[in-house]
Amino acid sequence: MKKFILGLLCGAVLAASTAVYASDEIRATLFPVKMKFNGEVRDTGSRFAILNYDGHTYVPLRFMAENLGAGAVYDAEARTVSVVSEPKNASDAQKKIWAATYRLERGMEAKDVKSVLGEPSFLTLIDSSKQQLWRYDFGASAGYSSGGLSADADGLSRGDLEGQLFIRWNAGGQVDRYELWTAKKAADGTRSVSSFTVYPDGSTSGSAAAN
């Protein structure tokens, strides 16, 4: 088995979605083992690696969460990993917002994104960088069309839609950066707009959407 060196185990669980810095190193080996969930074999694919260290098996938390009907997100500022189950009694739009929050990650390919979120509402090339950009409009009202490459904060505030997601792709056809905008309705009927961005280096800003 190939040798694999990683920093102190903190960041391995989210399949390298955020860089980890540590003075200590752990030497582990890639572990070519099959994973079964309720008797069904699930392929880890190229996104995840299973490791063996000191007789213990280390499986990416995101892979485990997704195959158990949940998702995971890492808050770098709070140094907290949140595992959240898929909402059962929610609208389709809210389920898509949940999936964008807890199942989308950098490095995913188009087929993986579509399996989670379906077809994008709009796609184009950004002239300045030639990067492909996908936009998803979640919970949009009939006939909605913003036509923009940036978030429609006014439309979110009015309730024209519940969320918007923008995905930028690298030259290799993988998710490079994404930005999720959502609106939350308060008891008095007002709607507050918030955003959560994951950058190409894995850093984040804003707050992950609540389910």
Image (cartoon, rainbow, N blue to C red):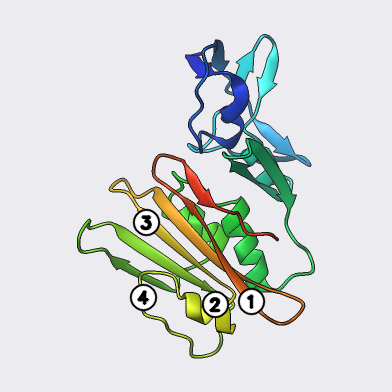
Q: In what element is the residue under mark 4?
A: loop
Which residue type carries mark 1?
Answer: Arg
Q: Position of residue 117 (x, y in %)?
A: 55, 63
Q: Position of residue 72 (x, y in %)?
A: 65, 45
Write down the residue under mark 4: 148
Q: Position of residue 128 (x, y in %)?
A: 20, 60
The answer to which of marks 3 and 2 sits earlier in the sequence is 2
Measure how far apart labels 3 and 2 are at the Cα level. Answer: 21 Å
Is the residue under label 1 in contact with that under label 4 (CB below 8 Å)?
no
Q: Alpha-carbon neighbours of circle 4 within 10 Å: few (<14), some, or many (≥20)?
A: few
Where disc 1 sits, the SS reads: strand
Q: Is residue 160 above or below residue 29?
A: below
| Above or below for 189 versus 101 | below
Q: Amino acid at mark 3?
A: Arg
Q: Which residue is mark 2?
A: 156
Q: Which residue is mark 3?
A: 168
Q: Between marks 3 and 1, how big is the CA–CA gap?
A: 27 Å
If you read the primary sequence from the N terminus, does the residue marked by circle 2 or circle 4 appear first?
4
- Helix, strand, or loop for circle 3? strand
Alpha carbon distance from label 4 to label 1: 21 Å
